[in-house]
Amino acid sequence: MHAMSSQGGRNGGPPPTTIPPPFDPEEFARESEMAMRAAKPASTRAPPRELTSTAEQPVAPPLNRKVRVNVPLSDLAWFELSEPALALAERMDGTTTLLELMEGDSSNDMLKAIAQLQQAGVLEYEG
C-alpha cells in the first residue's frame, strides 16, 4: 500500500472530503439491531400474501338486474372460462336476473361461474 501524503489524495489530487450523514449512525445501528431482535424468525411468520391494489379488486355483480353476455357466444372461446361458466353464459339472454338464474343452484360452482364471467368483463346489466 502507498502512504497518502497529508497534502492530497491519490495521484496528488485534492484531499478527499467526507460529509457526515444526515442521521446519527450509532443511533441508527442501535435501532436496527433492536428491530432485528424484535422480528420473529422467518419460520414463525405467516407466508406473505399477494398484494393487490384496490383498483384491481373484483366488483360484485348486481344480482337483481337483468343480465346478458355482451359478446357473441362464439367469442367466449377466447376467454379462459370453465364449462359451468360457458353453460351459464348461454342462459344469459337479458330476460332474467342473476338471482333468477341462481334459483335452485347457489352452489360454489354457480358462484365461481358468475365470478369468472364478471371478471372476464363479458356481462352487461340492464338499467
Image (tube, rainbow, N blue to C red):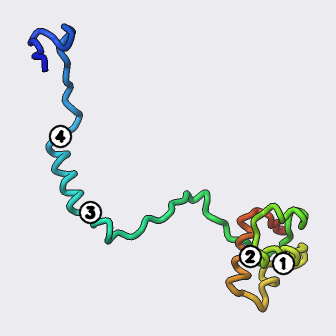
Q: Residue at x 10, y 16 (%)?
A: 3
Across and down, in percent, residue 40 comes to 27, 66
Q: Are marks 2 and 4 in contact (CB under 8 Å)?
A: no
Q: CA distance from mark 4 to mark 3?
A: 21 Å
In the picture, measured across the screen, residue 95 lies left or right of residue 51, that is: right
Q: SS of the residue at dot 2?
A: helix
Mark 4 burial class by Cα count in 10 Å: few <14, some 14-19, many 20+: few
- Residue type (three-letter) at the residue carrying disc 2: Ala
Across and down, in percent, residue 119 comes to 71, 65
Q: CA distance from mark 3 to mark 1?
A: 50 Å
Q: Are marks 2 and 3 in contact (CB under 8 Å)?
A: no
Q: SS of the residue at dot 1?
A: helix
Q: Which residue is mark 4?
A: 25
Q: Are marks 4 and 1 in contact (CB under 8 Å)?
A: no
Q: Are marks 2 and 1 in contact (CB under 8 Å)?
A: yes
Across and down, in percent, residue 105 comes to 76, 89
Please report whichever mark, 2 or 3, sits nearer to the chain's N-terminal start. Answer: 3
- Residue type (three-letter) at the residue carrying disc 4: Pro
Please report whichever mark, 4 or 1, sits nearer to the chain's N-terminal start. Answer: 4
Across and down, in percent, residue 30 comes to 16, 50
Q: Which residue is mark 2?
A: 113
Q: Which residue is mark 3?
A: 39
Mark 1 burial class by Cα count in 10 Å: few <14, some 14-19, many 20+: few
Q: SS of the residue at dot 4?
A: helix
Q: CA distance from mark 2 to mark 3?
A: 42 Å
